[in-house]
Image (spheres, helix red, strand yellow):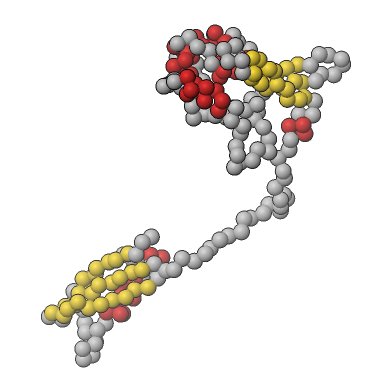
């Protein structure tokens, strides 16, 4: 808290002795009163403004205590004193691998890599492919995810586009790289994805500010 300034008018304060003032005692009493709890202030100083008819006006200035560094060490769990490292996908899913299918965007000739998980079955059965939206592991938080959309956005800016939302391109009948990416991952046709977004029944949250997509 900032410094707390309180002006206290004490009526009929008794003067102690000849010219003595009991403001220090009153200030101490005021400091610890219910009006001003002890934790609000660490020091109280008083000054007498004037005396009239045995009435004193006292200004009590309360300042907070100096900041004390109260850093606490984290409590360790006796059963698990240290955090374990995040296991890799290979450890969590030993019988499956993360694969990527490649598809070429027709208008720009951009090659997209869409991830999926391939489950390897036993008994000589063919592998089984399932949905996988997991991102990469052990990414440097300072650099972040690969900015695979940066080139797409730069191409649209160079073309002179003024709007970069997916619904803007959908309503113009344009299938963007993002729409093709979603269509392949969801096992749908690109035109179906475009039409659903254009009608407002689906949303692709990707504009010029979203430069990173997981692969």
Q: Please say if 145 is above or below 108.
A: below
For the question of whether residue 28 can be seen, the reply is yes
- Displayed quadrant of residue 25: bottom left
Q: Nearer the viewer, residue 149 or 188?
A: 149
Q: In the orientation shown, which residue stands out farthest toward the front?
A: 158
How far across and how far down the image is residue 188, in percent? Answer: 60, 10
How far across and how far down the image is residue 172, in percent? Answer: 45, 11
**Is residue 175 shown left or right of residue 18?**
right
How far across and how far down the image is residue 124, in percent? Answer: 87, 15
**Is residue 78 shown left or right of residue 40?**
right
- Taking the spot 79% from the left edge, 16% from the top edge, the residue there is 127
**Is residue 140 shown left or right of residue 89?**
left
- Displayed quadrant of residue 138: top right
- Taking the spot 28% from the left edge, 76% from the top edge, the residue there is 46
Q: Please say if 205 is above or below 89.
A: above
- Taking the spot 80% from the left edge, 25% from the top edge, the residue there is 95
Q: Nearer the viewer, residue 46 or 35?
A: 46
Q: Please say if 82 is above or below 192.
A: below
- Displayed quadrant of residue 142: top right
Q: Nearer the viewer, residue 154 or 143?
A: 154
For the question of whether residue 206 can be seen, the reply is no
């Amino acid at each position: 808290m900032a410094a707390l300034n309180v002006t206290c008018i004490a009526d009929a304060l008794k003067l102690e002795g000849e010219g003595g003032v009991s403001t220090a005692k009153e200030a101490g009493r005021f400091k610890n009163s219910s009006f001003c709890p002890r934790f609000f202030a660490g020091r109280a100083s008083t000054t007498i403004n004037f005396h009239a008819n045995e009435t004193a006006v006292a200004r009590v200035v309360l300042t907070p205590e100096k900041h004390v560094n109260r850093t606490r060490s984290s409590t360790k769990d006796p059963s698990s004193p240290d955090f374990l490292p995040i296991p890799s996908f290979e450890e969590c899913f030993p019988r499956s691998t993360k694969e990527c299918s490649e598809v070429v965007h027709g208008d720009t000739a951009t090659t997209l890599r869409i991830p999926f998980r391939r489950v390897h079955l036993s008994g000589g059965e063919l592998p089984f492919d399932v949905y996988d939206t997991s991102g990469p592991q052990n990414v440097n938080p300072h650099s972040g995810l690969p900015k695979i959309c940066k080139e797409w956005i730069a191409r649209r800016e160079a073309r002179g586009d003024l709007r970069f939302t997916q619904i803007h391109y959908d309503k113009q009948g344009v299938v963007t790289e993002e729409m093709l990416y979603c269509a392949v991952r969801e096992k749908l046709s690109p035109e179906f994805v475009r039409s659903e977004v254009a009608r407002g029944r689906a949303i692709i949250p990707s504009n010029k500010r979203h430069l990173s997509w997981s692969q």
